[in-house]
Image (spheres, rainbow, N blue to C red):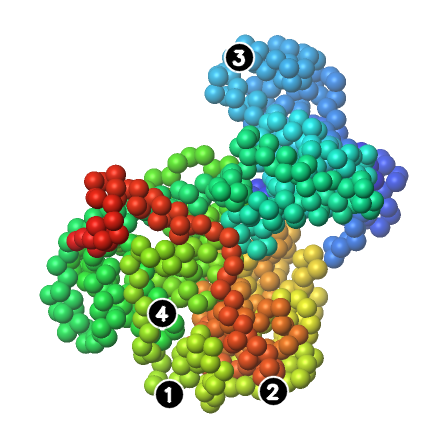
Amino acid sequence: MIHRGMYDGTIYHNPSNRFCIISVKTADKEVPLEARSTRRYRDHLIRFVATGYELPRTDAVELELDGEWKQGKYGMQLQVEQWREIVPHTKSGVEGYLASGLIKGIGPATAALIVSRFGEDTLDILQNQPERLLEIKGITESKLEDIKTSYAESRMMQDLMALLSPFKITPKTALKIYQYFGPASVDILKRSPFELCQISGFGFLRVDAIVQKNGGDLYDPMRVKGALFWVLEDGKEAKGHLFLPGEALRKEALRLLNNKIPVPSLRLQAQEVADVLQDMILKGEVVSVKDNIYLPRVFAQEDETARCIAMRLVELSEPEQVERVLERAKREMGVVLSSRQEAAVYTAYRHNLSIITGSPGTGKTTVLKMILEVYRRLHPDGQIVLMAPTGRASRRMAESTGFDMARTLHSGLGLGSEEDDVNRTKKQEPLSADLIIVDEFSMVDMWLADKFFSRIKGGTRIVLVGDPDQLPSVGAGNVFRELIDCGLVPVTVLDQIFRQSKDSLIAYNAKFINDGNTKLYYGPDFMFMASDNQADAAERVIACYCKEIKKSGIDRVQILSPFRSEGAASAEQLNEAIREVVNPFRCAEDEIKIGVKVFRVNDRVMQTKNTAKVSNGDLGFIRYIKDGENGKRIGLDFGIGRELEYSVEDMVNLDLAYATTIHKSMGSEYETVIMPLLKAHTVMLYRNLLYTGITRAKKRVVLIGQKQALFMAIHRNEISKRNTLLGTRIGMYFHAYVRHAGIPPGDKAEKEWKHAG
């Protein structure tokens, strides 16, 4: 529904994502009665509330707003899908528009000079001859570029919104498309909407349905290209593949393409798909390596990471006299190291890149403490950096090692998300660290590994710590496993259990599970409670949770479910049920609805997106919900020194966290873990998932469900089948670099080079 009106005031504006809530005044009698403000105004115009992205906040133009009326907690509002500025064709109207602040680089004084010079032709000049603005005093070449960019982006956004109106996209999504394709966005998408399949969130079926509805050609090569792009993108996002074999890619694309063609004789043929793919390869739109097909950016990530690692492996390490320093440190700290632990310390000082692995309780933290202590003594002025993929893991690392400066990889490298990185063009400076230790490296995906290894200066010592038997990274790739399996990176495996009291069962059972042994030890700290179905299991989980939090405190107990949303024992449904028991409804003022989510004061919540002050996976509590000048404000407590205030828009990055999925728990530790395990979860029941879940617990594990489900998970040892050639590529570059350095061919010579120093 389209309504015309004028901007009346700003209720809320978020500069980071450009979301606005504004008041609009209009004479339009079509505005629903329930949406109208009940206040009386002297101009007798109707007021209503509109929400959307980048809505013009100036009364210098008339607004044409196209959207749907939605009833929400704060009344009926117009949710704007598209909008258009209507600039009055008068000198004063044009001057008001230019002076409104909508165009970067033009303020009131400059606007007056421009209109004085060009009159009513100003907008035509701005659109078609912007270089003539240099005739205006004060407008430099640099300032002109700002004006042109700002005006072009504003026009482009509106053109994109109009072009893609059948897709029902938000201006936020339009901005994402503009950032991906640049100034040619409209021309590219006019030529082929299937180019959208390159962007996350635009599945082939969605794009195809709309194109065909508008008279699209089922045999258009652009349609074939769109299907191929989407299959590659889906393989990366849903299955973690860096590439797809050409045959599998062609086959899946053909299936998608022929899904809408019921008559066999009219369906596309395999050769037609193969021809389009070959054309894409020749144009560099995809990369083919022995018929393994990559998206170009993904190939670049794998290739550059392999180059960086191989160069580091052939870089001879400076000899370090560690023996005396280590012995003195052990004696003074009262630490006894096993032979494997001692070997891990020596390896860290013999090589510029090494790996330490081991299950929980095998002494990884003790080794890290000794590496740090030895380094401080050898290099008092050396710069040390400790990092981990999540905020919880980095804080745990700081607490366990006594080194306060541990950070997340994202903050340490100055990163946002992979999507945010698409348009980053500035080459960042190398990290100035002399020793870098990264914990929980099994969580690092290919994109993050590329960012990490490309930022390290020559000569820096790197120690990667992790557990390859846990679930692989959420993002694409299997970096840690590939580094270990390539056979070129020095690896120390810690396999003797030290952690916790000697009678603790968690570490021992973790080892049994990894060995495929179903004969687990049970006791007070590792329990199994039988339950036949999801509903019964959910009741037992809730009862157990209430008992445990009463004994230990709510911040020390966590429910981990294999499933996110399906069934009563899934994380989402357990969250809703538990919240009604431990934090029931009290009053409307203590509750806020964000989309389909409802949050209450005292709710336990999890952050789902990295920000400057809080990391993805961090747990906290809602402390208050109150009215502010610009809408609701919500107080969050993520621990000492991290009390934050969120806006309504920030709340979209929160989930309830009484229960969470095992995948979401990666990198975290809890005193007590409660885990439902049922045959209804069969699709998720694998050894690495079970192992990851129980190793999140420090003191106590309670499994609730069916023994058959437990045994199934232990027996199903799925080594991640992600398509990646990182290890192979590291080996290829390593051998090439060694030979380039003048080392004669042969494994023995190369091995001696590798272990030199």
- Disc on res. 134: 3
Q: Give the farthest residue toward the left.
A: 324
- Amino acid type assigned to the residue bearing label 4 in the image: Gly
Q: Nearest to the eye among marks 4 and 1: give it.
A: 4
Task: Identify residue for label 1.
Answer: 503
Task: Identify residue for label 4.
Answer: 358
Q: Earlier in the sequence, mark 2 or mark 3?
A: 3
For the point 79% across and 53% down, the residue is 71
| Residue at disc 2, secondary structure | strand
- Amino acid type assigned to the residue bearing label 2 in the image: Ala
Task: Identify residue for label 2.
Answer: 530
| Distance (Cα) linking label 4 and label 1 | 19 Å
Pinpoint residue 119: horizontal percent, then vertical percent. Answer: 67, 11
Is the Cβ of the residue at disc 4 closer than 8 Å to that at disc 1? no
| Distance (Cα) linking label 3 and label 1 | 80 Å
Pinpoint residue 306: horizontal percent, then vertical percent. Answer: 38, 46
Pinpoint residue 678: horizontal percent, then vertical percent. Answer: 62, 78
